[in-house]
Amino acid sequence: MKVSNDDLIKLYGNMWLIRMFEQRAADLFAKGVLPGFIHLGVGQEAFMAGTHYSIKPGDSIGTSHREHGLLLLLGITPGALMAELYGKATGSNKGKGGSMHACLPEKGALGCNGILGSAQTIINGYGFAHKVRKTGNIAVTIFGDGAANRGDVHEGMNLASVMNLPVVFIIVDNGYGISMSSKNSSVVTDLSARAAGYGMPGVTADGNDVLAVIEATSEAFKRAREGGGPSVVEFKTYRHRGHFEGDPTPYRSKEELEMWMKKDPILRLEKILLDRNVINEKQMKDIKAEQLAIVDDAQKFAEVSPYPEGPEGYGDVFYKYEGRD
Ligand SMILES: Cc1ncc(C[n+]2csc(CCOP(=O)(O)OP(=O)(O)O)c2C)c(N)n1
Ligand SMILES: [Mg+2]
């Protein structure tokens, strides 16, 4: 799949947007500004930017708990996502979804299901709707190496296959499910091998190489759009940060982290941009600065935004208190 120079530059900007947004969220969380829990996707930018590249308007995308980045690319504005993390009324979900449940269904961003594995059965409903309505769109579900071992995932894959649904199962093997190495949670090295059990194609690609991600997703998505049915795409990548912010990561070595830092997906794309003479180092710095300014603005927007107030605080949520049905 040929990716134009203009698109390479866009991918580069998108990857920096994700990196900057996530790093800012890490800083704000450490300062106690952001409530709740956050899981960050630093190091996993290539799989998000590359997957987004293959998505078309009208597709339905279910993300997991580590994909703020993909939500940004799908259309939640940085300000609305940052405000959501702050719990502010101007957030994408009025501050009531937070990191885990931010979503924008009108742009196909379905958000995350907190019960690992369950989204991989639910996604079939979206796939079935696209099939019966003949939309030409697809449904994509993204989940981790840990989630991949849940029974529901297998049910979901089987049903998608039996019904020949336009569904793509994207497994993100980032090395760990919390503290459990993916090497110890499955005897199969490539989790895409699961696809064979359901008679569908499965591929494993380098999730830190945005061009490999585009290659793998464009093929699987095309097949699904054209009635060729479901498939599994697995990306091997690494999360630079802990499972959640505040995780001291005693389960992994310094050497392992350093080895993966050398495979940083942004550095990989920078090498491609320089080797192909697409842009020079000064232009790369400018792109990075542009994305940083966007994140600064997002933070300012979130800071000055109000919290949901009065009765509004109780709207849109399942909550019952005395005197109210
Ligand atoms: C059914 C279920 N079991 C356990 C959890 C708690 N939990 C949340 S995230 C997580 C690890 C997920 O690992 P993985 O699927 O590899 O995704 P990653 O965090 O690495 O992105 C666990 C066990 C949960 N949310 N749902
Ligand atoms: Mg994982």
Image: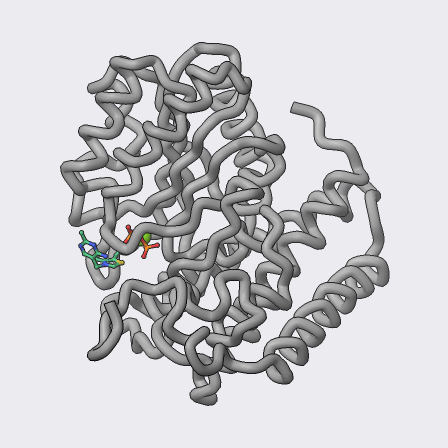
Please determine whether, in this image, residue 221 is positioned above or below residue 170: above
Nearer to us in this view, 143 or 315: 315
The residue lying at 35 percent from left, 23 percent from top is: 202
Colour theme? one colour
Q: Position of residue 221 (x, y in %)?
A: 51, 24
Image side of residue 13 versus residue 280, left or right: left
| Quadrant containing the N terminus in the rendered view | top right
Nearer to us in this view, 325 or 57: 325
Q: Residue furthest top?
A: 227
Q: Position of residue 189 (x, y in %)?
A: 26, 37
Please determine whether, in this image, residue 269 is positioned above or below residue 83: above
Image side of residue 215 versus residue 115, left or right: right
Please determine whether, in this image, residue 43 is positioned above or below residue 184: below
Image side of residue 175 versus residue 187, left or right: right
The residue lying at 30 percent from left, 36 percent from top is: 122
Q: Position of residue 69 (x, y in %)?
A: 54, 55
The residue lying at 39 percent from left, 15 percent from top is: 229
The residue lying at 41 percent from left, 57 percent from top is: 66
Q: Position of residue 161 (x, y in %)?
A: 29, 17
Please determine whether, in this image, residue 26 is positioned above or below residue 107: below
Where in the image, quadrant-wise, is ligand 1 located?
bottom left
Give the image quarter of residue 243.
Answer: bottom left
